[in-house]
């Protein structure tokens, strides 16, 4: 029997149809994965199920009965809970306080005083029931990211939900935490819960789910049992063609002994005066990709900002081919041969309200073929845009339109094209495939490898461990603002890198420390 079903569920935003007559069915005690490209409509669908959006038309059935869900509280009352990708926890409160927030237990019905002993006992029983490893009295700020996710799940379970929706649940977890999460989810299924997972990680889909629904451009294009499909088949359904899921990192030439990029003892503080980078030192050789791995929030963002001129160092030195470029502005760094793929494409790399052509030259206005005698050469700029669109397979509806009208993958390709075509000697690529569909990931990975194979240097920062492992020649791991070790991706497993990402020493990690 279906515990949750949608019939022709449709959501329109003006003339744009985000979900077009979606029909899905989830059985009781099933783990269902919803997959699709970025912008396919997965999150819109889940937000309708959780009451954050109202459908334009169509029906939602819970336990075979048509149900109107007016908001998250209404969804929870109907036994449906959601764990968002970005946790909604209070760091300064304890595990038990977060789980019972808004549902506190009082000493008596007439007393306003919270019964803390009763609350701790209640949460302890809940933790034991679902076999989650947590201490109810620990503060959220002191536990791991995986632990925080378990708290979010327990918040929903305490409210007696039967159906649990998880949005990109492994996005910020180490490989070990992913394994623990899967054990927890399978245990929940065994105890009668139904679980819906939104994800783009096909390896995890195959490992976790009982069935998979594929959404493409707002429509369901596939409903399959996991045992009857493969990663390759799911990828083909998502993109509409065969896709290479893992590029082959075959270097045409060995990395040179020449150091292209040197970072020495770099430190910095954030706006609150806290030191977020501690004595960061590494080098990237000519013809090499150096990967930076780590769970998000361990200093990678600050490192990129320091290296690309958006934050100042408090100590240390950065040099490109021996030339000191410490604390230089982005335009000076580009003049010294640095290409930059920023972490957030719209905050730091593109302007959504500007034309495609203007975004193709952003950061390069002083280049002679772009600007002559202080005037922009519109003819050359249009030619450059047209070449980028053709050479980098950028799919545009209106060639004269704004970048904001493009999909995430095509917007990212504007940055890739712009930075590679500037002929840099060194590329800093930060989260180069974040929010990008599988087909575009394949293309971007090949561009990065081709760039390296031409004898250039790449510093790759990514929260996707599979990306770091498949592209990098060497890997350094960041933990709490420090480099905790250096590894060869060909000599270690995902779990060994995962231990370092969690701050646990590993004998294979050169220079690892705690």
Image (cartoon, rainbow, N blue to C red):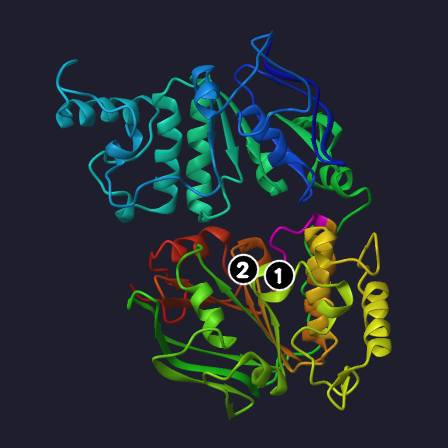
The disc label shown at residue 432, or none: 1
Please state the horizontal and vertical placement of residue 451, each as a whole percent of the image: 70, 74
Which residue in the protein does label 2 denote? 462
Give SS at disc 2: loop
Q: Left or right? Give the position of 209 relative to 185.
A: right
Q: Left or right? Give the position of 490 relative to 300.
A: right
Q: Is residue 314 rendered magenta in the image?
A: no
Discs 1, 2 touching: Cβ within 8 Å: yes
Please state the horizontal and vertical placement of residue 75, each as a whole percent of the image: 48, 20
Please state the horizontal and vertical placement of residue 265, each as a whole percent of the image: 36, 80
Give residue 443's quadrant in the image: bottom right
The tag earlier along the polypeptide, 1 or 2, is 1
* Closer-to-camera residue (281/277): 277
Give residue 53's quadrant in the image: top right
- Which quadrant of the figure contains the N terminus? top right
Q: Which residues are magenta?
A: 433-438
**Rendered position, 72 above or below 179:** above
């Amino acid at each position: 029997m279906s515990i949750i079903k949608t019939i022709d569920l449709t959501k329109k935003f003006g003339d744009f149809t985000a979900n077009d007559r979606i029909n899905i069915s989830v059985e009781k005690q099933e783990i269902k994965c919803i997959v699709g490209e970025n912008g396919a409509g997965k999150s819109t669908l889940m937000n309708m199920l959780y009451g954050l959006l109202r459908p334009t038309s169509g029906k939602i059935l819970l336990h075979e009965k048509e149900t109107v869900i007016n908001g998250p509280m209404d969804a929870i009352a109907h036994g449906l809970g959601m764990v968002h990708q970005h946790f909604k926890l209070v760091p300064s409160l304890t595990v038990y306080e977060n789980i019972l927030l808004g549902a506190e237990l009082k000493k008596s019905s007439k007393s306003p005083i919270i019964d803390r002993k009763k609350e701790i006992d209640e949460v302890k029983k809940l933790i034991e029931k679902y076999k989650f490893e947590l201490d109810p009295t620990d503060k959220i700020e002191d536990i791991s990211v995986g632990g925080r996710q378990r708290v979010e799940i327990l918040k929903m379970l305490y409210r007696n939900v039967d159906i649990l929706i998880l949005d990109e649940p492994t996005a910020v977890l180490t490989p070990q935490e992913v394994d623990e999460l899967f054990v927890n989810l399978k245990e929940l299924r065994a105890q009668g819960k139904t679980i819906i997972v939104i994800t783009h990680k096909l390896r995890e889909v195959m490992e976790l789910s009982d069935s998979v629904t594929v959404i493409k451009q707002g429509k369901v294009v596939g409903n399959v049992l996991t045992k009857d499909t493969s990663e390759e088949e799911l990828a083909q359904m998502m993109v509409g063609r065969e896709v290479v899921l893992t590029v082959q990192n075959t270097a045409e030439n060995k990395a040179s002994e020449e150091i292209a990029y040197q970072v020495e003892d770099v430190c910095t503080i954030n706006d609150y005066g806290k030191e977020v980078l501690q004595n960061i030192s590494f080098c990237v050789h000519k013809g090499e990709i150096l990967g930076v791995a780590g769970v998000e929030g361990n200093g990678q963002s600050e490192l990129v900002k320091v290296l690309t001129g958006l934050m100042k160092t408090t100590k240390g030195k950065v040099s490109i081919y021996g030339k000191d470029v410490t604390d230089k502005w982005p335009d000076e760094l580009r003049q010294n041969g640095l290409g930059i793929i920023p972490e957030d494409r719209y905050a730091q790399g593109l302007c959504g309200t500007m034309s495609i052509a203007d975004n193709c030259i952003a950061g390069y206005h002083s280049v002679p073929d772009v600007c002559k005698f202080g005037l922009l050469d519109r003819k050359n700029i249009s030619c450059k845009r047209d070449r980028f669109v053709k050479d980098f397979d950028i799919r545009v509806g209106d060639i004269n339109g704004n970048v904001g009208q493009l999909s995430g993958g095509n917007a990212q390709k504007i940055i890739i094209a712009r930075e590679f075509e500037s002929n840099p000697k060194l590329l800093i690529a930060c989260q180069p495939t974040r929010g990008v569909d599988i087909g575009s990931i394949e293309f971007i990975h090949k561009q990065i490898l081709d760039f390296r194979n031409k004898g250039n240097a790449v510093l790759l920062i990514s929260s996707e461990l599979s990306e770091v492992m498949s592209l990098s020649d060497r890997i350094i791991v960041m933990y709490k603002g420090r480099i905790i070790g250096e590894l060869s991706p060909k000599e270690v497993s995902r779990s060994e890198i995962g231990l370092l990402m969690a701050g646990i020493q590993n004998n294979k990690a050169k220079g690892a420390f705690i």
